[in-house]
Amino acid sequence: MRPTLRPIRAADHAFLRSVYAAARAQQIALSGWDVATADAYVRMQFDAQNGFYRKRYPAGHFDLVLDGDIAVGRLYVAREAQRIHVIDLAMLPAYRNRGAGSALLAALQREAGARGAAVTTHVELNNRSISLYQRFGFREISSAGFHRLMEWRTDAPPGSIHGQSVCKA
């Protein structure tokens, strides 16, 4: 898959909530909640997360990941002087393991490499995406609570799929 990006619009809110729900599906399933309670939880947590990201990274880029015209995920990135920080990268389950995340990370690494910056991200301790970041040369530089701060530097081995490109829609 060659993903493209486009800025999030107000009409994308329900889709973004579904991406959040998919990322938390296992946790929600273990809760034993009824559908209404689970939906209320997702709405509350998504709104809190979205508000936090927007406040913490006011100059961030908040994009939908597209496969053609189909929204398949989200990529939130903060570009700073010395680093590109991946705030959040999440795909709907049907579009995971199809190369979109790899293509997006490779593009960010190329961008960072061109300006001598690092790429960083926080990953939850039990998140399977840690192996993706490790394949792309990210190393854990600290951990706090349930998150690891991972970093890729230009002197690290490049991502195995470095040749793919990502273009803005």
Image: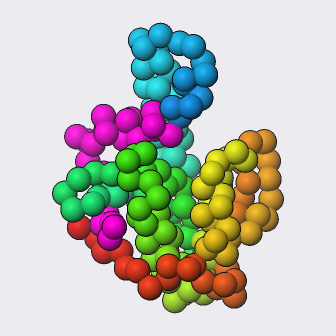
Residue depicted at 74% across the width and 42% down the height: 146
Direction from residue 36 to residue 121 in the image, left or right: right
Tell me the quarter of the image containing the N terminus. Answer: bottom left
Residue 41 position, x and y percent, is 50, 21
- Work out whether residue 76 or residue 22 is closer to the camera in this orientation and state it: 22
Given residues 84 and 107, the one toward you in this image is 107
Counting from the top left corner in percent of width and height, residue 97 is at 47, 58
Residue 133 shown left or right of residue 99 in the figure? right
Name the one closer to the observer, 81 or 127: 127
Q: Is the magenta stretch mostly helix, strand or loop?
A: helix
Q: Is residue 79 in the magenta section?
A: no
Residue depicted at x 43% and y 72%? 103
Q: Quadrant of residue 133?
A: bottom right
Q: Can residue 40 be seen in this view?
A: no
Range of the magenta residues? 1-23
Is 32 situated above or below 23?
A: above
Whole-percent x and y of residue 101? 47, 63
Whether residue 17 is situated above or below residue 157 in the rendered picture = above
Q: Is residue 86 above or below residue 128?
A: below
Residue 169: horizontal and vertical position, in percent? 23, 67
